[in-house]
Structures are given as structure tokens and as C-alpha cells.
Image (cartoon, rainbow, N blue to C red):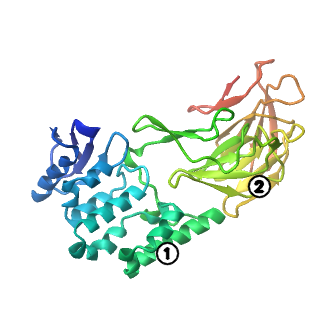
Amino acid sequence: MDTIQASSCENNLKQVLTSKECEPTNFRNNSHSARILEDLQSLRKNEVLCDIRIETDDGCITEVVKSDEFLSLSSQDVVKIISCNDLAVPYEEKVLDCVMRWVNHDLDPRKDFVPELMEHVRLPLLKPNILFKISEEPLLKNSPKCKDYVYDAIQFNLQKSVEHFTIPKTIRCKPRQFGVSQKVILMFNLSDTSPKCYTECNQKWRTVSSMSTERWDLGVGVLNNLLYAVGGAGNGKCLTSVEYYDPTLDTWTPVADMSACRQGVGVGVLDGLMYAIGGYGGKYLKSVEVYRPSDGVWSSVADMEICRYRPGVVALDGLLYVMGGESDEPINDTVEIYNPKTNTWTMERLSRNGVQIYGGVVVDRPPNCIN
């Protein structure tokens, strides 16, 4: 598809319009960021149908929503904007705010459009407290369709908080993917109690919600787009607890505890399962547990051959590679490979004798060790 890119000086507003009917064109509007929507209106009047992405320097569309240009859009134009999968919003609350501002700007003639608009707001991605609040909103409460949307979203969040389940294959349950941007979340062990999130698209750091339990020397894994904080130590003791962070809601939710406390645990994710490997719990550990999100419980698998504290873990081609780490031995330069199909471990020793291994990565070839 062809692309039209529009930008203005103020707020670094970017709008990407794609159309099969027009040649790539660049234009600028220096008077006000939100006035770029007038150009969209012009294109629409000329029957150029477009998909849209609106971005600002902080990754949201708040200023655009407040503008007279947005508030004067037709219902069809608003639907076109809020239905876009790559709409640049940090949280879905911004989209809900778009809808409510537009409707309330001219309530009487617009209230009948609420069900059509709310169909494109991804309510399951809202925080539970916001869902319960809007369930009492008269505009939604008086519409059977909107009541169903809110009820389904509340049920989605209730099930999600108890255990993981198969996410419904509806667009309302999927996070928006503006710019196919990736977020990098760093877990700081000692000096910080809250994780920090880096978003590639706007190259900014921000602090996210604090974990429900203070923990350091923890393991971290990503499973089903959720960030898990596994074990670690906190309040003077080794921890069995595990919780996950949902970046679409900016919330932490506890899951089932492991059977053993694990400080300095290695974490690996393979084929939709998460493994807690080794660690320290009063002594060095070689035991391994696996978490199945389908039933929300941990279970034991075969032990490793040797104990490993703070090992590196890499998943590759259906196998788990557990590298190095610390133990009673002064130097641990071995790698153990776990095959989940046979529930067995295979030991290999690296050629670099005398080198302590702490981690590994996969870069389009077999794992690379980091010492």
C-alpha cells in the first residue's frame, strides 16, 4: 500500500495515512498539531479511504482528542481512527477517553453512536477499577450492547487474575501494535524497587507499577506477553512467590507459589511453559519446576546433574540450555541441556576450562556463552 506521511512542528505529531488510491505525498502543517486532521477530512471529501496512525512525542493522542478538529469529526471518522490496530496510545484508556469526549461534545445527536463506537474500544485491556467505574456510566449502562461489552471485559479480567487461559481471538482482547514497537522492561535488583520500561518508538524510560512483594536476586521470564518475577529474596528471607506484570494494564498479579524458595533462580520459557531452574534456598539447588499457565500450577521435572545458582538459561530448538552458575564447585564451566520430551538432562563441558559462565544468548546460531 502507498503511504502518505504528515508531520508538524508542534508536538512532533505524525500521522500516517495509507491508501491504495493515492501516490506517496509529504506535506506540513506548522500552525497546530491537531489541524493535521483537517487534511484527513480533505482526503475523505475526495473519497480517498485511509487507514490512520496518529503519534505524538509521548506516544499518545491526548492533545489531538482535545482539539476542535477532532471533536468535529463525523462518527465514521472517529470509528476509522479508534479501530486502527496501530493507533499510538500507551493505554486503552486513551481510546475510551477519545470516545467519551467526542460523544459528550454534542451529546443529544451523538449518544446513539455509542454502541458502534464502543465496539472498537478494547475494553478487556482496561484496568479492572476503570471497568467497574464505567459500568455505572449512564451512556453505557442504558445500552444493551455496551453492557455486554463491559460485562465481557470484566469477566476476561476476572479469569485472567485467577489463572491463565486461552485468550479469545477477538480484536478487543489484543493490544494495539502501533509501529510494531517493542518495550524493554528492566528489573533492578537492589537500588530500585520498581521496574523501569523503555519504549523503542519514543526512546523514553518510565517507571511502572511496583511489584506487590519486594524482591531482589530474582529470576525473570516472559510468557504470553506477561513479565514474570520469579522467587528471589526479600524482607530477609528466600521467596517461593511468583507474580506477573501485564504491560497493557500496568498491574502485577500473583500466581501460585513454587514448591521451593529460590534465590538466584534461572528462568527459561520453552513451548509455552516456564521453568524455574536451580537457585539457592538455604543450600544450592539442582531441582527444577515448570509452570503451566493453562492450569496455573507448578510441578517438578527431572533434577539437573549438579546444583546451579544464578545460571544462564537459553531456549533453542525445543531444548533448554542451562549454563554455568555458581555451586559448591569453585568453577562451573558446564552446560546442561534439558529435553522436555524425554524429561532428561545431558551434560556438556565447554572447551574453555576454568571460565565461569553466567549467561547466554541466541543470535541466529547455537547459544553464545557470556562469562
The quarter of the image holding the C terminus is top right
Q: Residue at x 76, y 34 (%)?
A: 310
Q: In this rendering, does residue 341 appear at all?
A: no
Residue in front for this viewpoint, 315 or 311: 311
Q: Secondary structure at mark 2?
A: loop
Structural crowding at the residue carrying mark 1, measured as other residues with C-alpha within 10 Å and reported as few (<14), some (14–19) or many (≥20):
some
Residue in front for this viewpoint, 236 or 258: 236
Name the kind of residue labelled 1 in the image: Tyr
Q: Secondary structure at mark 1?
A: helix
Residue in front for this viewpoint, 167 or 319: 167
On the image, the x and y values in percent for residue 159 come to 60, 68
Q: What's the distance in space between the residues labelled 1 and 2, CA to CA?
A: 30 Å
Decide: is 123 above or below 221. Answer: below
> Is 157 left or right of 53, judged from the image as shown?
right
As drawn, the label of residue 221 is: none
Which residue is labeled 2 in the image?
Answer: 257
The residue most toward the left is 46
On the image, the x and y values in percent for residue 13 come to 27, 42
Q: Residue at x 56, y 33 (%)?
A: 364
On the image, the x and y values in percent for residue 259 come to 83, 53
> Is 272 left or right of 27, judged from the image as shown?
right
The answer to which image quadrant residue 345 occupies is: top right
Name the kind of residue labelled 2 in the image: Asp
Q: In this rendering, does residue 302 appear at all?
A: yes
Structural crowding at the residue carrying mark 2, measured as other residues with C-alpha within 10 Å and reported as few (<14), some (14–19) or many (≥20):
some
> Is 148 left or right of 51, judged from the image as shown?
right
Decide: is 190 above or below 146. Answer: above
On the image, the x and y values in percent for residue 112 come to 27, 77
As drawn, the label of residue 151 is: 1
